[in-house]
Image (tube, helix red, strand yellow):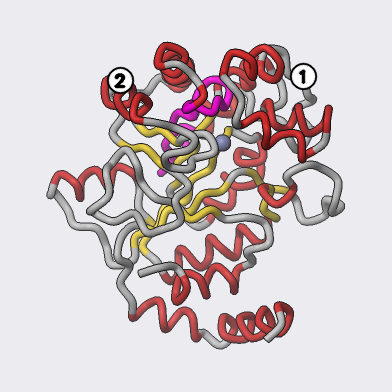
Amino acid sequence: MNFVAAQSIKRGLLATGHYRRALRRSRFPGVAVLGYHALRSDDWPTGSMAFENLHVRASTFEAHCRLMRETCDPITLDDWRAALLGTAPLPPRPVLATFDDGYRSVFTIAAPILAAFDLPAVVFACSDPIERRSLLWFDDVAERDGEAAVEPWKGREYERWLAECATAPRIVADADPRALMTIPELQALSRQRGIEIGAHTSRHAILARATPAAQREEIGENRAALEAWIGRPVRAFAYPNGRPGVDYNGETLTILRELGFDFGFTMRPAFATAAEPPLERSRFMVVAEVMGPELAHRMAYTWPR
Ligand SMILES: [Zn+2]
């Protein structure tokens, strides 16, 4: 069956309530943590910026939120902490939306939709570009040298990357779709019901390429800045790029443990089960092409059980 036909069948299955019935009968083997990055309004022209698939359309995100609210059991990290302490068990289909990087569209587009559905979320933010009002290094490199130039830099040694990619990324206007939140916006977001702010390094460093001292600085400075801005402890972390064994290492885990983080999120696509280490939680990455029916299909059937 071709892609278009499959999509059309999935749309029908969602419209007739098939996925809703299937999901309501099911129990997840762990928490379904969804890994988002940024949002975009529906009227943005396609092909207008790099890494477009990381910017989910508002209407798609709204369909995802409706699905989470109507067929799953949205939880906060505090609900999860309580379950780990044995205070209250997790519901049958726990789901949690997360957003990496700190894009401004999470505040302007996602936050009102989350509020409308009373959905919790965790937002992992890089503090250095927030403070400078600059692009994230990969958006800057993509603008300078094209999207394909970014991947090799993820494999290069930290000091060289810092000097050539992350020391002076270009400043962007707040209206630019690649802009990060301002400090007051991050503060306002942190006060929205159900929203927790987490750390993601100061500059979106690939931690495995850095010395333990540099890793500690990237993580520690990021957390200190976020805590000073929001006036609350920051205890959750998401690894930049997030591939276990590739983008972070054993030193990273030691540092997070020493700094008192209690949750670490990777990009390993699986349900986050009770068996996995708290500092290496799995997540399902969600990109723009995953429309509402496709997310329902994955939740009900194709995500590995
Ligand atoms: Zn990231």
Question: Which residue is at the front of the view, 229 or 192?
Answer: 229
Residue at horizontal 42 percent and vertical 39 percent from the top: 245
Quarter occupied by residue 12: bottom right
Choose between 105 and 185: the one closer to the eye: 105
Query: How many marks on residues?
Result: 2
Cβ atoms under marks 2 and 1 closer than 8 Å: no
Left or right: 46 as drawn, with respect to 204: right
Taking the image in four quarters, ligand 1 sits in the one at top right
Q: Nearer the viewer, residue 85 or 305?
A: 305
Q: Is residue 260 above or below residue 150?
A: above
Q: Is residue 228 visible?
A: no
Give x and y (percent) for residue 55. Answer: 69, 48
Horizontal and vertical percent position of residue 17:
51, 84
Question: Residue 41 appears at what percent x and percent y?
Answer: 75, 51
Write the residue at 41% across / 58% down.
270
Point out which mark residue 171 bears.
Answer: 1
Side of 130 relative to 65 (left or right): right
Residue 293 visible in this rendered orientation of the protein: yes
Which residue is depicted at the point 48% across and 80% down?
Answer: 19
**Could you say whether the residue bearing mark 2 is in a helix, strand or loop?**
loop
- Crowding at mark 1 (Cα within 10 Å: few <14, some 14-19, many 20+): some
Which segment is the magenta one?
190-208
- Residue 132 in the image: state x and y as whole percent: 67, 15
Quadrant of the rendered image containing residue 21: bottom left
Q: For the residue marked with disc 1, what is the amino acid?
A: Ile
Asked if residue 273 lies left or right of residue 210, the reply is left
Of marks 2 and 1, the one in the foreground: 2
Q: What's the mark number on residue 259?
A: 2
- Residue at left 33%, top 77%? 26
Does residue 251 show up magenta in the picture?
no
Q: Upstream in the sequence, badge 2 or badge 1? A: 1
